[in-house]
Structures are given as structure tokens and as C-alpha cells.
Amino acid sequence: MGIEVIRAGMLTTIQDLGRYGYQKFGLNNNGAMDEGAARVANILVGNDEHKAVLELTLAGTSLKMTADHLIAICGGDMSATMNGQLVPMWQPFIVNKDSVINFSQYKSGCRVYIAIAGGIKIQAVLHSYSTNMRASIGGYEGRALRNGDIIEVCDMSNQSCSVGLWQKLRQIDSKAFNAQHFGIAHEENVPIRFIAGPEYNLLDEENKRKFTESKWVIDSQSDRMGYRLQGPSLNMIQKQELISEGVVHGTVQLPANGQPIVLLADRQTTGGYPRVAVVASVDIPMFGQLKPGSAITFVEVTIEEAEQLLFDSEQDMKRLKIAIQLKSKQ
């Protein structure tokens, strides 16, 4: 019972919500780049939202089901088809044994998440299923998936919500719950909210205006570790060496070339570049769906505003969980 990787595509890994508690040992967190899409995918199939999911990057992945499964596909739109027919996104659906799901040309976004009812059957490493490719731990043998890999899936019989959804979707007149409104993938200039970082005041007023009023383009030298931005060069009031200090998810560093770097899921644990900003937690998943060439602008908010935005987002997630649980019992 599981999934066969016919074609792995550009980069397909197993991720969850990250490996926390080990940064003091120099081990980065990893986890899904678009955490919101990964959480929604799990919730839609009745899983705990911390279960492992597949993270697909851009196009080219092809998967074959070795048994009947209840799955959900969320995140970017990569024209997913099952046996040649378009499949629904942001809702649970049943795939039959020997069905082949292809991801070809992307229409929007950068990453897709696939959750399977019951969860992926792998061993947790340091309390996480996420793949850390630099340390070669977690996920599937600590590496990206390759052609021919077989991903085993846990039995969902001990998850009443998944079983309820399965039985519901087997009914001819059943209508699946759709969570499309959680999608964030788009190609327009994306506003990213941030709070001032510890070294923000090393920028004078002119350079602060450059930071918030300029359009920043995602550089091609970007990956899960960090996104490099291209735009007007930012200059500090004075050049100074900083002692390496801890960095967090969404820290915006400013290296000597004046082009900011946004640290993301596979970031290092410390850094010596000035930390001019920190992306609001609610907007960090946006980077998971941005490709090289996409553009962003920075919008400053207070810590209180950032907390309220995150609180509101979490309330939406709670409402989705309740709706799915009710759907599974109808």
C-alpha cells in the first residue's frame, strides 16, 4: 500500500512542519516551504496537520498509486491530471489502485503538497519527518525522491475522521469540501509584511524608503535555504562587522552587496549579516509559492499587527478543522 515514484521531477521531498528544538546544536528546522498548504492538505484528508506530506517543486513529477487512497493536493497549480483527466485541488478525493497522477506545466505558484489519509510510513528523526538534505537525515533516506522509489502509507483505520471522509466520498451524491480560499499562489507583485529587525536602524531614512518603496525581484540563485532579492543597492550608515547571532524563519539579512536575503525553511541557525527585517509569520508561506522572476514589496507592520494577522489566520485554520470533522460525521 503506497505510492510509486515514476518520475521524481525537479525536486520532490517529504516534509512536515519542521524539526524544532535543535538549533542550539546547529541543526536547521526544515519543513514545508508553504506551511499553510501542507497543513490544509493534511486536514482535508482527516490527518493530524503535523503528518508528513510530499512537497513537489515546479513540474515534472509522476506518481502511481499501488492501492486505493484518499488524498488531497494543495498549493501551486501544476495542471495535475489522473489518468489524463484534470484532478481537483484543495479538496479530498479518492484515487484508485494503478492510477497515475502527473504534474506537468505550472499555471501558478511553485510548490505542490500531497497528503495521504493515514500518513506516510517513515521513521521520524529527532521528532520530525522532514528531509534535511544537507545532513542526509529525515524523510526518505535523507534525500530527495528518485525515480522508482516506493513510498509506504500508514493504515488509516485508526483515524476516524479519515474513515468517515472515505465513506462519505464513496457515496454517489457526495460533495467534497473545498478549501480553495486558503490558496496563496499568484504571480503579481506580492506585498510582504515585515517588522523591523535588530539592525534596521543601521539604514538611514533614504535607505529605509528604498527598502519599502522598491520592487524586489526573486533571484535565480534562490532555494529552500533562502531567497535572494534583486533591487536597488541598500547602504548601511556605517560598515561594521557583527558577531554571528541567531536567525529565525523569515529573517531578512543584508550582505555587503546591498541585496537582501530572506532566510527560509533550510536556513542556517546563525548569521553575521545585519538583520534589517523579519517577515511576519503569516506571510512566510508566500515565499514557498514564489519563483525566480516573481516580485515582492515590503510593507512594515508592528509586532502587535503581525501577531493579530497570525491569530486571524489560525482562527481560519481552526474553522477548517471543525468543518472537516463535521463533514466526516454527516
Image (cartoon, grey):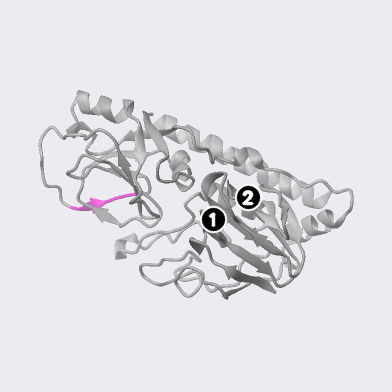
Residue density around tag 2, few if under 14, some if 14–19, many if 20 or more, within 10 Å? some
Which amino acid lies under the numbered mark 2 shown in the image of this protein? Ser
**Which residue is painted at 40% across and 41% down in the image?**
293
Q: Quadrant of the N terminus?
A: bottom right
| Element on which disc 1 rests | loop
Residue lying farthest to the right in this orientation: 172
Residue at the location (58% across, 55% down)?
A: 113
User: Quick one: label 2 or label 1, which is nearer the N terminus?
Assistant: 1
Q: Kindly identify which numbered label has been placed on residue 59.
A: 1
Describe residue 194's horizontal placement relative to residue 185 as left or right: left
> Residue 7's mark?
none
Name the spot of residue 136 as percent of width and height, x first.
40, 72
The majority secondary structure of the magenta stretch comes to: loop
Residue 16 lies in the magenta stretch: no
Question: Which SS class for mark 2?
Answer: loop
Q: Check disc 1: other Cα within 10 Å, few if <14, some if 14-19, many if 20+.
A: many
Task: Specify the quadrant of the image occupied by residue 240.
Answer: top left
Q: Is residue 96 above or below residue 200?
A: below
Q: Are marks 2 and 1 in contact (CB under 8 Å)?
A: yes
User: Which residue is disc 2 drawn over?
Assistant: 79
Say which residue appears at 55% left-offset and 34% top-offset.
Answer: 312
Q: x, y (%) of residue 12?
A: 51, 63
The percent coordinates of residue 25 (x first, y second) are 30, 65
Separation of marks 2 and 1 at Cα, in angstroms = 9 Å
Q: Is residue 129 above or below residue 214?
A: below
Which portion, as a residue range, is magenta? 244-248
**Would residue 255 appear left or right of 147 to someone viewing this image?**
left
Give left or right: position of 195 versus 208. right
- Left or right: residue 267 versus residue 318 is left
> Measured from the top left, where is residue 233 in percent x and y?
21, 35
Along the line of sight, which residue is nearer the eye, 289 or 16? 289
Residue 62 lies in quadrant: bottom right
